[in-house]
Amino acid sequence: MNWTERRERFRAILSGNRCVHPASVYDAISARIAEDLGFELGMFSGSVGSMAVLGAPDLVVLTLREFADQAYRICRAGNLALLVDADHGYGNALSVRLTVEELETAGVCALSIEDTVLPRPYGNDGKPRLSSVEEGIGKMRAALSARQDPNLAIAGRTSALAIANLDEAVTRAKAYEAAGVDAIFLAGGVTVEAVEVVSSAIRLPLILGGGSGQLGDREWLAAHRVRVALQTHAPFSAAVQAVHDTLKALRDGVPPRELKNIASPDMMRRVTRAEDYQRWTRDYLGGQ
């Protein structure tokens, strides 16, 4: 498991001239499927982590230990380069240092630290709020100082477009660029104008959520220095629906042989890397 080689591949995406769609992954099997299908990059988000590990909504109740452990399982499963959403860094700037240490050790290629006040504070009206620019800069600097492998990429993530306005987003993108981050992640409220303005105001590559129209046109995105564009986290929702439908069918009395949309034995052997285990059994256990 050569973490540096994977990180170099991710760095090549950031420094290249293409826009890449990552596969939304959440466990070892989903990561292997993404790798087998030819995805260059995987994305493990805090929201999907909360659902996969806790069965909880995206309320930032997942702990760093739980998130890092799942990221490690994803990285260990194969050779997929992995970008993760580390939310607010699980605390203040000192917590951010620990977050980077844990996720670097887990094998991720890149992580984003955001400037939203998380988790929801007591008495808050439910509306998301931004931390101060100064606190955001402190977190970015702490993240950068904590990494041991310089190839690990740190993205400054801002929700300013969704919570404040375009001017505030530009201010924060410039501030995080000056702090030394490797990319800017624009989260929520992204428009064509916002991409044009932010990309012209800074020199860093951009990471975006999904979009339609021009925001879904990879050539247009690439021309505006967007190097990674997410495509929602539909795979996890699809898996939930598939498990629900299968269990419901069994509960309703459908015979197992009549179940639909079940992975074939060949696919199960492929995603579990059965041939590798058979070879290791022959080599090390004297078996067949």
Image (cartoon, grey):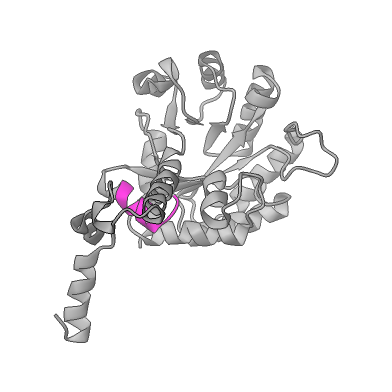
**Residue reaching furthest front?**
253
**Residue reaching furthest left?**
288
Q: Residue at x 64, y 57 (%)?
A: 63
Residue nearest the observer in this picture, 19 or 210: 210
The image quarter containing residue 100 is bottom right
The image quarter containing residue 256 is bottom left
- Residue 239 in the image: state x and y as whole percent: 40, 47
Please, what is the dominant secondary structure of the magenta stretch? helix
Magenta segment includes 133: no
Q: Look at the image and tell me whether residue 247 can be seen.
A: yes
- Residue 131 in the image: state x and y as whole percent: 75, 36
Q: Residue at x 51, y 57 (%)?
A: 104
Q: Which residues are magenta?
A: 26-34
Residue 73 shown left or right of residue 111 in the figure: left
Q: Is the residue 226 above or below the residue 77 in the image? A: above
Image quadrant where one finds the C terminus: bottom left
- Residue 191 in the image: state x and y as whole percent: 54, 17
Q: Residue at x 18, y 73 (%)?
A: 279
Residue nearest the observer in this picture, 84 or 17: 84
